[in-house]
Amino acid sequence: MREIMEESGGIGLAAPQIGEHQRIIIWKVGEDEGVLINPELTPGKELEIGVEGCLSVPGMAADVRRALRVRARGLSLDGRALEFAAEGLLARVLQHEVDHLDGILFVERAEPGTLRPAPMTAVTGI
């Protein structure tokens, strides 16, 4: 999964995006990278709107409202329980990828009228 994400210029990927029917997400946001199996997110109350793109919908971007902070729980690759807080871009990526696990694309969460063409170089692919 990591190779596909990096080759595609993404910063996050969910297993279903590559045909794997498992609840696994990966990310690499700056120096922060990880894998979470069976992720569960608890969003904070403060929301922000940010631009999102997606490797599953290349060439499109939209403004999406998401929680600024989340609490994440799940398992590591070796089966250890993980729990951590995330904010900003990492919180957005985690929410975006968990949406994939639940069959939701960012275009379904887009603020009305904001879906637009955008080259992947202009938008970070999540």
Image (spheres, grey):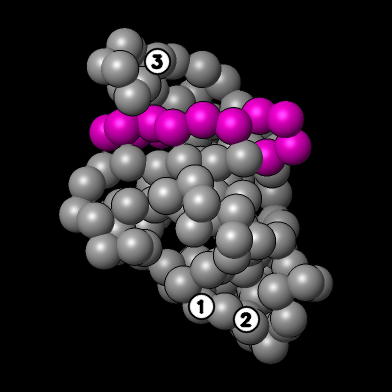
In which quadrant of the rendered view does residue 31 lie?
top right
The disc at residue 82 is 3
* Residue lying farthest to the left in this orientation: 21
For badge 2, the amino acid type reads Met
For badge 1, the amino acid type reads Val
Magenta span = 29-41
User: Which secondary structure class fits the magenta region best?
Assistant: strand
* Residue drawn at x 39%, y 31% as measured from the top left: 36
Around disc 3, counting alpha carbons within 10 Å, would you say few (fewer than 14), some (14 to 19), or many (20 or more)?
some
* Residue drawn at x 36%, y 63% as measured from the top left: 17
Q: Is residue 35 visible?
A: yes
Which residue corresponds to mark 2?
60
- Residue 102 falls left or right of residue 121: left
* Residue drawn at x 49%, y 46% as measured from the top left: 2
Assess whether residue 52 is covered by the magenta stretch: no
State the CA–CA distance, disc 1 to disc 2.
6 Å
Mark 2 vs mark 3: which is more N-terminal? 2
- Residue 36 falls left or right of residue 32: left
Question: What is the quadrant of the C terminus in the image?
Answer: bottom right
Q: Say how many tags the image has.
A: 3
* Residue lying farthest to the right in this orientation: 122
Report the front residue among 117 and 41: 117
For badge 3, the amino acid type reads Leu
- Looking at the image, do the residues carrying marks 1 and 2 touch, with CB atoms under 8 Å apart? yes
Assess whether residue 39 is covered by the magenta stretch: yes
Query: Element at badge 1?
Result: loop
State the CA–CA distance, disc 2 to disc 3.
33 Å
Mark 3 vs mark 1: which is more N-terminal? 1
85, above or below 3, in the image: above
Q: Position of residue 100 (x, y in %)?
A: 37, 57
